[in-house]
Image: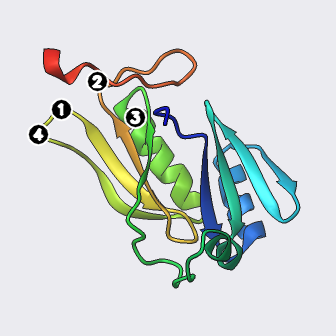
Amino acid sequence: MEPRISLITLGVTDLDRARRFYEALGWRGQEVEETVFFQAGGLGLVLWGREKLARDSGREAGGAGGFGGIVLAHNVRSRDEVDALLAQAEQAGGRVTKPAAASPHGFYSGAFADPDGHPWEVAHNPGFPLAEDGTLTLPDFDTL
């Protein structure tokens, strides 16, 4: 298996509400057959009904809002961008779950949950520089 993630699909309880939330963050969605697709750098973020997604993956749908064992991350180029994005997410209807703060490891981050409870970390980490197009290449940790 090649080390690649092509799509991340979030199971949502209200597709229209979820789409409005992500579009309020500046994303552009395209709806096809009750599924909304967003281009997110080199991968796709997909919104699909929670029950449908659970059935499609052979699972039972749990309640929205509980921790599902996954956190999405969005790295930015500065501390100010962390603060601005957390404020934008809250204004769009999300909930800040961890106010931004500096870590002992040299990065600055906070977190928010979208209206369905999917957690997002927003981080500025000088050790993980972003390319001009926003792609992130992990450093070689053996040389640090």
For disc 2, the neighbor class at 10 Å (few under 14, some 14 to 19, many from 20) is few
What secondary structure is found at the residue carrying circle 3?
helix
For disc 4, the neighbor class at 10 Å (few under 14, some 14 to 19, many from 20) is few
Residue 126 numbered tag: 2
Query: Which amino acid type corresponds to the residue marked 3 in the rendered image?
Result: Asp
Q: Which residue is mark 4?
A: 104
Count how many numbered circles sit on residues in the image: 4
Q: Which residue is mark 1?
A: 106
Query: In the image, 144: left or right of 74?
Result: left
Closer to the chain start, of discs 1 and 3, is 3
Q: Nearer the viewer, mark 3 or mark 4?
A: 4
Query: In the image, 58: left or right of 31?
Result: left
Q: Which residue is mark 3?
A: 80
| Residue at image point 28% right, 24% down | 126
| Residue at image point 25% right, 19% down | 140
Closer to the chain start, of discs 2 and 1, is 1
Q: Nearer the viewer, residue 144 or 6?
A: 6
